[in-house]
Amino acid sequence: MSVALVRPSRPPLAASRRRRTLALAVITTLVATLLAAVQAAPAQAAPVLLSQGSTVTASSQENGGTAAGNAVDGDGGTRWSSASADPQWIRIDLGSPATLSRVELAWEAAHAKSYRIELSTNGNDWTTAYSTTTSAGGNETLTVSGDARYVRLTGTERATGYGYSLWEFKVFGTRGGGGPEIPGNAQIGFYTQIAGLGLNPNATTFNGDVTVDAGWFNGNATQNFWRSAENLTLNPVNGTNRWAVSQAAPFRRMHVKGGLNLAPDGYGWASGGYIADSKIDGTVGPYSQQQWYTRDSSVGGWTNAVWNMTFSGVQGAPAASYPTPPYTTLDTTPISREKPFLYLDGNEYKVFVPAKRVNARGVSWDGGTQPGESIPLNRFYVVKQGATAATINAALAQGLNLLFTPGVYHIDQTINVNRANTVVLGLGLATIIPDNGVTAMKVADVDGVKLAGFLIDAGPVNSPTLLEVGPQGASADHSANPTSLQDVFVRIGGAGPGKATTSIVVNSDDTIIDHTWVWRADHGEGWGWETNRADYGVRVNGDDVLATGLFVEHFNKYDVEWYGERGRTIFFQNEKAYDAPNQAAIQNGATKGYAAYRVDDSVEQHEGWGMGSYCYYNVDPTIVQEHGFKAPVKPGVKFHNLLVVSLGGNGQYQHVINNIGSPTSGTSTIPSTVTNFP
């Protein structure tokens, strides 16, 4: 089962001349949903490399540099070698059943004269698929057949006095496991969501790559916004999938049977991204990615860091080492709940709502389906083109949830979500535009509302707010069943004129903000210092609010303001407004500039990890920003691993937080960091 949710657009607008260029696609027509549900027998796919990055065990290893995993890492310069004794074995766990077609062996000089290739579905019972007593070593290609999850090479006689030594042990075939298989490659563009329709990522196997690259923009991936890949298993053709993105491009609930490359071909600029609830069997290579956040996942390895790589609840994450290299690593995520998703149960569409997790580590779905609730589609109002705010509110009043199909929805009144546990799920980045200065959506102070997968685009008449979670003064305890925002994005200007005083206001306690990009445009159409005026990005008044993956950029004043107690943010990415005309335009009383992230002086407890603010004042490069972060100096207010960066010397920071931290200087794009505050 698979679903592709696609909304076409014009090509992105021409880029401005600046170091980190931004662009967006402009929607010109309303389009229908493409739902392709594959329910028939699996397609006949070409054999692919299945073994790279898989779990490997062996009877022995010669030394610390010749581990079994070296034989499946795709690197012809690393090897597994055994002790000098007979017999010896090396076993690959492919992770799920597959129909095998061939095995390729690359022996070192110390090869096997006699060996067997053995297959097993359960790891206990083995059948021989190939055997020889006359191997000459070197590179061998062996034809095999059979269904197996486990593949074992057992050496029975060595050709030399040394142990058995393999540069590479490759297994090819097609994936089985009961779900459909889809061959081919998918290039994921603007406003495109690709998602499996299974209850588990392993239910839908994509034999090929789901790719984002930046060849269209001369190798620069900083414009690769507004797209997603979700709920699929990938068998990359060459062993590594490329996902070179920046903001608003989540990689969720994915299983990659190989490696993952987060940089564009040619290693051009890439700036910011998000992985959650995903299993990457091989190594993740960020390369030129400047910052990234990975949550509740499993990785086979991680190669490097540029400015800010943050992990929470990630098995295989690198150890904390900020600032050299700049890894921020938390063993668990304090509170998380995965994003709701559409799936096909037989012939019936349903939406699965995963349960809340506490101190999560690793994916939620490994070993079977995770705890949660399945909601039949007949309990949803499926929002299609032509729907009005009045009809949407009438459906909500009847107790229905909302499923927005891809499209652009102009609303002339606020969408009011008043019932506990309501799900509002968008497909294909469905876009809501408030007309006449209304607030696009308000959520009552109730338990367990789930908002996910949609974009709010500000209208030309100023809205006081675009999204409100809870009314002013909200105080109910939602700790057992919090409201969550996941892949909820906000754009002000860029696709046309837009204004809003404050984008998102969170008044309800215990809210989870899990991956949002809140963006005041400084590029495209309908932008300018006053044209798309937007003073504040996100304001948090509720207590015990947790943000995991908070991206907020370019606001005229404060990007984030926090008034609630015991707030926590794990990973924050910010750029100050590029288009400030002069120093006076951003003057904040006696302070030069507004902080990117401000905790109010009244707050007693707050904590943040892995947080960065960057400036690129290209209109007036002489602008000075006092600091990126502002917070009261109190024992309960803590920050870990902060940085500020001046991009090419266009504007400068004097400090990192308050009056602490060295200034940025000159034209070098080198972060100034603070490891712990206070």
Image (cartoon, grey):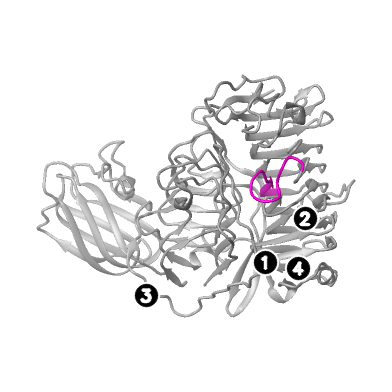
Which comes before the other along the chain, label 1 or label 3?
Answer: 3
The amino acid marked with disc number 1 is Gly
Vertical arrangement, residue 492 with respect to residue 130, above or below: above
Q: Is residue 235 left or right of residue 480?
A: left
**What is the C-alpha distance between the residues marked 1 and 3?**
34 Å
The amino acid marked with disc number 2 is Gly
Q: Label 2, secondary structure: give it.
A: loop
Q: Residues within 10 Å of mark 4 (few under 14, many from 20)?
A: many
Q: Label 3, secondary structure: give it.
A: loop
Which comes before the other along the chain, label 2 or label 1?
Answer: 1
Query: Do residues under tags 3 and 4 come within 8 Å of each other at their CB atoms?
Result: no
For residue 401, which numbered disc appears in the image? 4
- Horizontal and vertical percent position of residue 669: 53, 28
**What is the C-alpha distance between the residues marked 3 and 2?**
48 Å
| Boundaries of the magenta span | 513-530
Which comes before the other along the chain, label 3 or label 4?
Answer: 3
Residue situated in front as seen by the camera: 97 or 126: 97
